[in-house]
Amino acid sequence: MAYVIRRLLMTIPVLLGVIFITFAIIKVTPGDPVQLMLGQRATAARVAELRLQLGLDDPLLVQYGRYVLNAARGNLGTSIRSQTPVLQEIMLRVPSTLELTTAALLLSVLVGIPAGVIAATHGSRVLNQVINVLALIGLSIPGYWLGIISLSFFAVELNWVSVLGGEGIKDLILPAIALGLPSAALFMRLTRNTMLEALGSDYVRTARAKGLPDYLVVWKHVFRNAMIPIITALGLQTGALLGGTVLIESVFARPGLGRYAVTAILNRDFPQVQGMILFSAVVYVVLNLIVDLTYVVIDPRVRRS
Amino acid sequence: MPDTINEIHPNKPTQVPQRTRMLRRFVRHRGGMVGLLLFGGLLVIAIFAQQIAPYDPLALDYHSTLQPPSPAHWFGTDDLGRDILSRAIWGARESLRVALLASAIGIIGGLVFGLISGYLGGWADVLIQRIVEIMLAFPTILLVLSIVAALGPNLTTILIAAGISTIPIYIRMIRSTVLVEREKEYILASVALGAGQFGIMARHILPNVLSTAIIYTTLGLGGIILATSGLSYVGLGAQPPTPEWGAMLTEGQRLFRNAWWPAFFPGLFIFLAVVGVNLLGDGLRDLFDPNMNV
């Protein structure tokens, strides 16, 4: 329990640091950020008004404190363009991104881990070579390119899915593949390597010597031990997949958080950018927390340390 | 009593230098060689773009718009009649320049802070490690987007952003290598001989962590190429009409209802470049440090 509390407290400086970085963004922006947001033709009066509204004339620490307090109450400011509360805009886009990331994660786990287990346990030379080449392709192919090419084939040529922003399950398949392929390759490599390492260890030899059937050795001993690095990777990959939505949502014109981040930056809508970054950081911190707490459950050694 | 080995075995054939042995082992590493040829080939194309490209990458030709691949235009033309092969060749220059410079920023930053953090220790180490922890606590892409948001979307920003965002990862890796190196006896000997801390770092530690740094840089380069091209693709990097692979993809996607080639070829180049550096990185790792776990 002490570990859990300590781990929870550790997230506070991280989040304060992230907010500080989002603040630094506005400070280091060359030129007046307000002028940038409003465009060159904005009147001096309008610029002054917005500066006042955003509190940009206050000392930096006051602004920072105010932002932290507001954020803690769930107020991430109001978008300059749409005049809508940023948190509301973000929440509107969460389901789409969540759907895509979950689909990509499921796909990469369901393809990557079994492929890794097969490669480690039944690996003939040819099969291993094939899996190696597939992993290399998976890790090297630009997902956004795969997305464009698959869209032009399945949507334009075959008319199986809609070209832009389809909402159905069918329209989730291509983006999930484009987003999840590198992760699948990574899980495959990782599972194979950790399984091979575990297969060569002493306790496996003991288990075999006891006369345990092969499937029990693999699933009860080897796979369970190989799970620890895989769970670490699971947390990291979920973060990477969320980051990947920035590119993939643009390919498929999906109305999610990634696309939102890009347009916020292109429009230089700073409240949107700040809110978006803080929100993602919170999600990421929570993800890391879940991963660390999972260790406590599956690895008794962590509990004791 | 003879005082050197050569006096004991005067006719012993001279040993093959270690460098030559390493080189031979690398040449026999099939993946590494394929990677070197692929990536090296693209680098040559990038350097000699002016001589190799058959057309001006920006030249418009309204008489041959959206032509499919043909002997006159191997990769076809786009809707403005620009030659896609020439644009992809010039794109190699833009895209690889950005990726290599970003890697350079990352690894130089990683070396400087990793050396200080690992060798000097103390409050410098604590401070650097806390900053690294915060930077690693949220996804790389967010750090990149924050920097792009601050400096405005263009290719130089992407380069700086991608470079800075990899620094913390490199600091971690370099630091752990330095920690191992620091404990070796020759360092103790140098200290005993009165060498200064910065002298030891520059003359002894740095050369010994350099091979590790090169491997990490190569292994990380693929990700940087994918990221920088990707950011250009969504409009945060290179702006049209710059021939850059990611930006070319954006233009290609606009045309994909009518033509597949404007999007296909720039993506293929990105893919080949990344395959090349990944194979090269794996080869270098097997060569220098087979036990490295990346």
Image (cartoon, rainbow, N blue to C red):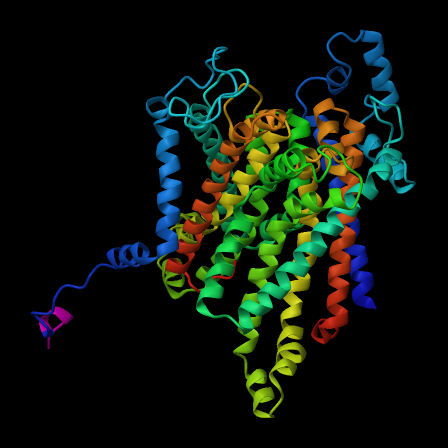
Closer to the camera, A207 or B127? Answer: A207
Q: Is residue B197 visible?
A: no
Query: Which image quadrant is residue B284 in?
Result: bottom left
Q: Give the residue at x 66% y 45%.
A: A179
Q: Is residue A161 visible?
A: yes
Residue B33, placed above or below residue B83 = below
Q: Give the residue at x 51% y 61%.
A: B293
**Residue A105 relative to residue B69: left or right:** right
Residue A229, placed above or below residue A42 = below
Please state the horizontal and vertical placement of residue B173, each as a whole percent of the image.
53, 54
**Residue A225 relative to residue A197: left or right:** right
Give the farthest residue toward the front: A158
**Quadrant into which the N terminus of chain B falls:** bottom left
Give the farthest residue toward the bottom: A210
**Residue B235 relative to residue A60: left or right:** left
- Is B2 one of the magenta-colored residues? yes
Please state the horizontal and vertical placement of residue B176, each as a whole percent of the image.
52, 58
**Residue B18 relative to residue B110: left or right:** left
What residue span does the magenta drawing correspond to? B1-7
